[in-house]
Image (cartoon, helix red, strand yellow):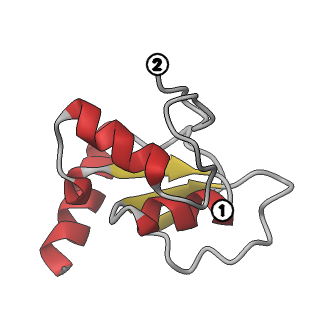
């Protein structure tokens, strides 16, 4: 089972290695470009983009000052973000590439 925090026993390498996300996409039977990852750190962002996936950042107090320039979007929290917002964001990222 893949853990939501990406620390599952399914892969040997830890983030920023993209294995956790590539394995998840493979098991779900979806293309990497159709995936959007939600992360809270630059290490997670690097893992997601290394897997060829879009990444949204919802930072924490300890990661707020990290460099998230590769993120599709950055939110202080996800309380006002709807699934339809993320779906539209992913569509725009895919269309732009």
Which quadrant would residue 29 be assigned to in this image? Answer: top left
Which quadrant would residue 17 be assigned to in this image? Answer: bottom right
Q: Quadrant of the C terminus?
A: bottom left
Residue at 55% x, 26% y: name it. Answer: 3
Residue at 60% x, 56% y: name it. Answer: 44
In the image, residue 16 sits, relative to residue 37, either above or below, namely: below
Tag 1 secondary structure:
helix
Residue 33: x and y, percent? Answer: 22, 60
Instruction: Give the numbered dot on residue 97.
Output: none
Name the foreground residue: 4 vs 23: 23
Name the foreground residue: 29 vs 13: 13
Q: Which of marks 1 and 2 is in front?
A: 2
Residue 84: x and y, percent? Answer: 26, 43
Residue at 50% x, 77% y: name it. Answer: 70
Say left or right for 85 vs 57: left
Q: How crowded is mark 2: few (under 14 residues within 10 Å), some or many (20 or more)?
A: few
Which residue bears the numbered disc 2? 1
Name the foreground residue: 85 vs 38: 38
Residue at 63% x, 46% y: name it. Answer: 77
Tag 2 secondary structure:
loop
Which residue bears the numbered disc 1? 43
Q: Residue furthest right?
A: 62
Residue 87: x and y, percent? Answer: 25, 49
In the image, residue 7 sits, relative to residue 38, either above or below, namely: above
Residue 62: x and y, percent? Answer: 86, 56
- Badge 1 or badge 2: first in the primary sequence: 2
Q: Which residue lies furthest to the front in this view?
A: 12
Q: How crowded is mark 1: few (under 14 residues within 10 Å), some or many (20 or more)?
A: some
């Amino acid at each position: 089972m893949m853990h939501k925090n990406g620390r599952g026993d399914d892969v040997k390498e830890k983030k920023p290695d993209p294995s956790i996300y590539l394995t998840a996409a493979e098991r779900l039977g979806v293309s990497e470009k159709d995936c959007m990852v939600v992360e809270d750190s630059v290490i997670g962002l690097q893992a997601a983009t290394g897997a060829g996936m879009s990444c949204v950042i919802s930072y924490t107090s300890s990661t707020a000052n990290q460099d998230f320039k590769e993120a599709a979007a950055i939110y202080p929290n996800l309380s006002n973000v709807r699934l339809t917002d993320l779906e539209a964001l992913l569509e725009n990222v895919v269309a732009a590439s």
